[in-house]
Image (cartoon, rainbow, N blue to C red):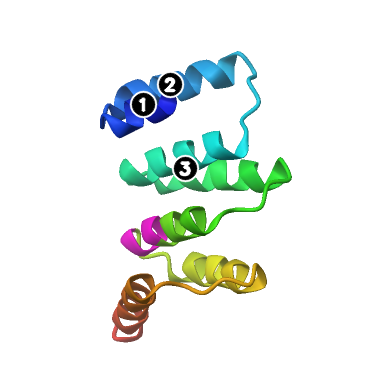
Amino acid sequence: MIHSRFSEEKYREAMSMVWEMEESNCLLDLPAYRVVIRLFVALDDLGRAMRYYSKLKEAGFTPTYDVFRDMISVCIASGRLTKCREICKEVEDAGLRLDADTSFRLLQLENQTMSL
């Protein structure tokens, strides 16, 4: 249900479903975490995206490449270079490499931060 609302870009409805699931203590599986994180990234809500990213890891799941990329994207949009670097380290530890676009946007953020 959350995925269908997200796919239809009905983000507020999807968010309501997340809160409903939380209130009823539903456990999320990896695909559900992926959609919930993607939802909060689409809403540019770093705090909630980070919260569910942490919950995903606490539940014993390993983030997938798309989750890493989405988290780096929302951190870049928020100007959170340190958090980007932490997630990049996790990407490396997982044996993955960032795509060229994400690497370029990260480099741009680093350059902006250095020039301040």
Relative depth, front residue between 56 and 99:
99
* 114 horizontally vs 96: left or right: left
Q: Amino acid at mark 2?
A: Met
x, y percent for residue 37:
47, 42
**Image height of 102 relative to 66, above or below:** below
- Which marked residue is nearer to the observer: mark 1 or mark 3? 1
Image quarter for residue 39?
A: top left
Q: Is the C-beta separation of discs 3 and 2 under 8 Å?
A: no
Q: Is the C-beta separation of discs 1 and 2 under 8 Å?
A: yes
Magenta segment range?
Answer: 73-77
Relative depth, front residue between 16 and 64:
64
Measure the C-alpha gap from mark 1 to mark 3: 14 Å
Image quarter for residue 73?
A: bottom left
x, y percent for residue 3:
41, 30
**Image height of 8 relative to 88, above or below:** above
Point 42% across, 26% down: residue: 2
Does 97 appear in magenta? no
* 32 horizontally vs 81: left or right: right
Q: Amino acid at mark 1?
A: Ser
Residue with the mark numbered 3: 37
Residue with the mark numbered 2: 1
Predominant secondary structure in magenta?
A: helix
Measure the C-alpha gap from mark 1 to mark 2: 5 Å
**Image height of 66 relative to 8, above or below:** below
Point 73% across, 45% down: residue: 60
